[in-house]
Image (cartoon, grey):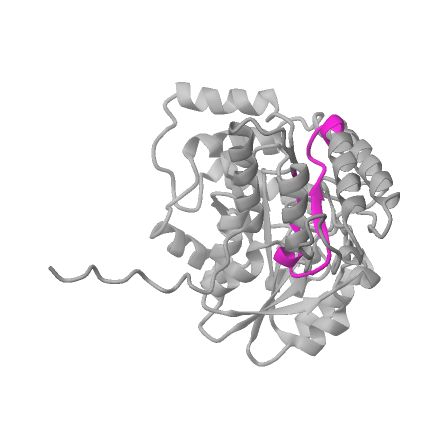
Amino acid sequence: MPAIRPLSRKLDRIAPSATTVLNERAIAMKREGVDVFNFAVGEPDFPTPDHIKEAGTAAIRDNITRYTPATGILDLKEAICRKLARDNGLEYAPNQIATTSGGKHALYNLLYVICDEGDEVLVPAPYWVSYPEMVKLAGAAPVVLNAGPDASFKVTAGQVRSAITPKTKALMLNTPSNPTGMVYTRDELAAIAEVVMDAGIYVITDELYEKILYDGHRHISIAALHPQMKEQALVVNGLSKAYAMTGWRLGYAAGPGEVMDLVVKFQGQTVMHPSAITQHAAVTALTGPEDFLPPMIRAFDRRRNYILERLGNMRGVACARPGGAFYVFPDMSAYTGRRRPDGRPIEGSLDLAMYLLEEYQVISAPGAAFGTEGCLRFSYATTLDIIEKGMDRVEKGLSALKS
C-alpha cells in the first residue's frame, strides 16, 4: 500500500499563538489541581451584561437559528453604522460593513482581500501575536517596525515613511494597544495619516479596546481625521472586550464598499456568517445601555494602579503606564543572563516566562511573542486577590535568580 500523501506545508512558517498556548496550559494545570496565577488571558473577567444575554436567549426561543446573509443581518449593520457615527464620528452605509466571527476574523479577511503574494504589510512592534502570522497566511510579508519603551511603544510617522516601498500594501495599527496599553494621540495619528495618504496604502486600524481607557485618554480613530483617510482606512472592532462577549464571537469591519464586497465574497465561500444568535444579541449590545462599562473600567483601573505599584517596586523592572486596555508590559531585560537556582540560564523572555510558570505557577506572556524581547505581558483582567498573590510570586521568583 502506498504511503499517505504529505500534509500541506503552508503552515510551516506560521507560529502558534503564544497567548493561546499559555492559556491552555493554565487550564490544564488547574485540572491537575495546581494553584495557577494566570496573567496571560486576554479577556475581561466580567460576565456578559444580562440584557445582552437575554437577547441571545430570546433569539433561541424565537427560532432565530438559521442562516443569515454572509455580510450579516441588516439590523446589526445599521446598529454598527449608528455606533460608528455616535462614538467615532464616522459615517458609513450598511454596504460598507461586514460582520465577522470575532475581531481576529475581520483582520484576517481584510488582509486576505487586499494582499497579493509578495506584498508587504508594516507591523509596528510590540504587536499582537497574530498580526505577523495573519499577514503571512494572506501571502504577504510582515515588515516589523520596532517601537521600544523610549518611544512609549508607539511607532512614529517617520518610521512608517522610511519603511514604505513599492511593495507596501498596508499598515497595521492598534490603539489602545495589546500588549502595551499605549494610546495614540490625535497628533500622532494625524502625522501617520499624512504619510499613509501620501503613499496611497491602506491602514488596518484595530480598535477593539477603544472603550477601556484611563487617565483622561480619548480614543481617536485614524479614519475620522480626513475624508481621504476614510477611503484608505479599514476599521476593525468587535464586542469581545467592551461588552465582555469574547466567546460570542462577533467582530466587524468598516471601509470602502469595494473592499467590503470582496470580504463578503471571501466570507461567503468560507465561514459564511457569524452566529445568527450572536448577531441578534449584538444589536441589543450596540443599541442598549452601557451603564455596565464605568464600573468595569473602575475595577480595571484599580487593578492597573496596583500592579503598576508592585512592578515599580521590583528591582530591575521598568514599566510604562498604560492608558488603555488591560495589560502591562514591563521591561525585565535586566534578568536576561541570570541563572535559575539550579544553574540554568535565563536567555530571554521565553525562558523567564517558563521559569515563573514552572517554579512559581505564574503564567505571563513572553515579549518575544509580541516582537519585543526582554518584556513580559501581564493581563490584569483578573481579581485583585490573584494579582496580589501572583505579584508576590513574581517578586520572589525574580529575587531567586542569580547574577
Question: Which picture quadrant has residue 168?
Answer: bottom right
Q: Residue at x 46, y 20 (%)?
A: 58
Q: Does 344 sit above or below residue 141?
A: above
Q: Residue furthest front?
A: 342
Number of disc labels: 0
Indicate the position of residue 265 as horizontal and vertical percent values: 38, 55
Q: Nearer the viewer, residue 400 or 321?
A: 400
Quadrant housing the N terminus: bottom left
Indicate the position of residue 236 as horizontal and vertical percent values: 59, 51
Q: Is residue 370 magenta?
A: yes
Over which residues does the magenta segment extend? 362-386
Quadrant housing the C terminus: bottom right
Q: Nearer the viewer, residue 35 or 216?
A: 35
Q: Is residue 316 magenta?
A: no
Q: Residue furthest bottom?
A: 166
Judge from the rendering whether residue 311 lies leftward or rightward of residue 51; answer left or right. Answer: right
Q: Residue furthest left?
A: 1
Indicate the position of residue 71 as horizontal and vertical percent values: 43, 46
Q: Nearer the viewer, residue 223 or 271?
A: 271
Does any portion of residue 44 appear in the rendered image? yes
Question: Which picture quadrant has residue 12?
Answer: bottom left
Q: Residue at x 27, y 62 (%)?
A: 6
Does any portion of residue 178 appear in the rendered image? no
Q: Does 144 sit above or below residue 322?
A: below
